[in-house]
Amino acid sequence: MERSAMQSVTLSLFRFGSVAARLWAFGQMATARFALKAIPEIQTFKLCGSGSGEGFTPIPNTAVYAILATWPDHDTARRAMHGQQVFRRYREMADETMTIFLTPASARGKWGGKEPFQPQDIEVGEPIAALTRATVKPKVALKFWGQVPDISKVVGKDPNVMFKIGIGEVPWVQQVTFSIWPDKKTMAEFARHDGPHARAIKAVRDGQWFKEELYARFRVDAVEGEWEGQTPSLTEKPKTATPDPIEVAAE
């Protein structure tokens, strides 16, 4: 089902319940990078916290943390995640964990001055995952976050979004939004609809609020683990989703 020699991108989410576990996870934001750097097969990785509510807020969610990583292929990723102590320890400490396996189809921009994703010549199919990463200029951070609560409400109410989460490396200024949609058409309709999201994008572009940005699209290949008590069916398009996907430009 999965193809070799194609870069694997994994998003691993961990939910911690107890105060002790949350303190441990917070500490790992500083210390886990050493163990991850020691994994020979890992290409790049990012340790991230998350936002509260729908995830797209400046208020941190102290229960949820994420590891975004890239690998030579899915098989290599799985072997490392099940064999390396750092990932085993995260699973042991967490109440819930879920990993989404992705293949990059397109990417534009940079992350920390580098291009972490290697787009493959593939048909994305259905569903489609979107990732936006940006470094917000500190002087406009308050303006930027003034737009976000309205966007968060719109995303949360959208019946088509299959999964969404807001994560980030540094609170307030380095943010990542990740979402999964039934197809390109529904994702495009949300992005282009004249509402809080479209107005925020226009404000960002007009004001040049971002110091650095990256937009990427992925094929969703597999999901392992549970989130909110169940394993989301993210690799299957809902029956109510809009058919006939169309191409969509990055936000």
Image (cartoon, rainbow, N blue to C red):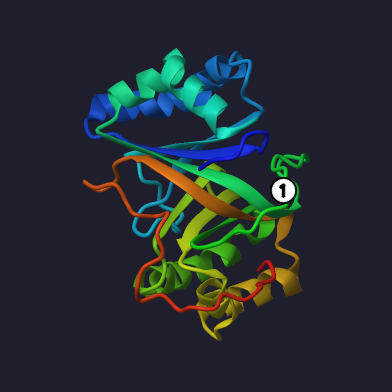
Residue at 53 percent of width and 71 percent of height: 187
- Where residue 114 appears, as percent x and y from the top left, is 77, 39
Q: Amino acid at mark 1?
A: Pro
Q: Quadrant of residue 40?
A: top right
Q: Residue furthest front?
A: 1
**Label 1: which secondary element:** loop
Relative placement, left or right, of 75 versus 123 is: left
Q: Depth check: 157 or 22 in front?
A: 157
Q: Residue furthest bottom?
A: 194
Q: Depth check: 61 or 111 in front?
A: 111
- Where residue 52 appears, as percent x and y from the top left, is 36, 53
- Where residue 186 appears, as percent x and y from the top left, is 50, 75
- Where residue 126 appears, as percent x and y from the top left, is 50, 63
Asked if residue 137 can be seen in this view, the reply is no
**Vertical position of residue 188 compared to residue 22: above or below:** below
**Vertical position of residue 116 compared to residue 18: above or below:** below
Relative placement, left or right, of 243 versus 234 is: right
Q: Depth check: 11 or 127 in front?
A: 127
Q: Depth check: 147 or 140 in front?
A: 147
**Quadrant of the image for the C terminus?**
bottom right
Residue at 72 percent of width and 43 percent of height: 118
Relative placement, left or right, of 228 versus 146 is: left
Q: Residues within 10 Å of mark 1 (few under 14, many from 20)?
A: some
**Vertical position of residue 3 compared to residue 138: above or below:** above
Q: Which residue is mark 1?
A: 119
Counting every numbered tag in the picture gives: 1
Residue at 75 percent of width and 65 percent of height: 208
Asked if residue 100 can be seen in this view, the reply is yes
